[in-house]
Image (cartoon, rainbow, N blue to C red):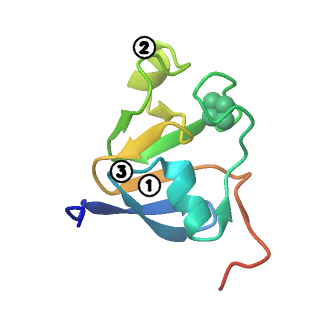
Amino acid sequence: MNAPTDTHSVTLDPQQWTFAAGEDESLFQAARRAGIRLPTICRNGTCRTCFSRMESGSVRYLVEWPGLSAQEKQEGFILPCVAVATSPIVMVNPHAEKTADAAG
Ligand code: FES
């Protein structure tokens, strides 16, 4: 049996949708599990299609060199396809959509 991992609450602005993100999955994967689609193409941290601003919270990355400058990281920009929540997060992505099978 796998040990349970911590989960953190993620709030999407401006939609005010929330979902739970585990420390073993990307924010993109956690959102998709909750029926929320974030815009993506590469899903490996290079294309920047998922580029989002984090208003609060903290993340770690699944890849060594996510496609963000040091300044962008400092300003709170993240790449949700390779970012993992390490605390509760509020992030801005006006292009997020609910998938057809999403409840609510
Ligand atoms: S989808 Fe390409 S960087 Fe996130």
| Residue 2, x across and y down, in percent | 24, 62
Query: Which of the labelled discs sits on residue 90, or is there none?
Result: 1
Of tags 1 and 3, which is closer to the observer?
A: 3
| Residue 92, x across and y down, in percent | 57, 49
- The 10 Å Cα crowd at callout 2, few under 14, some 14 to 19, many 20 or more, is few
Check whether the beta carbons of the residues at disc 3 and disc 2 lie within 8 A of each other: no
Query: Which of the labelled discs sits on residue 63, or is there none?
Result: none
Mark nearer the N terminus (2 vs 1): 2
**Image quadrant where one finds the N terminus:** bottom left
Mark-to-mark CA distance, 3 and 2: 24 Å
Residue 8 position (above or below residue 69): below
Mark-to-mark CA distance, 1 and 3: 19 Å
Mark nearer the N terminus (3 vs 2): 3
Q: Residue at x 54, y 34 (%)?
A: 79
Residue 100 position (above or below residue 47): below
| Amino acid type assigned to the residue bearing label 3 in the image | Asp
Which residue was labeled with disc 2? Answer: 70
| Amino acid type assigned to the residue bearing label 2 in the image | Ala
Query: Which of the labelled discs sits on residue 24, or is there none?
Result: 3
| Residue 25, x across and y down, in percent | 43, 50
Mark-to-mark CA distance, 2 and 1: 20 Å
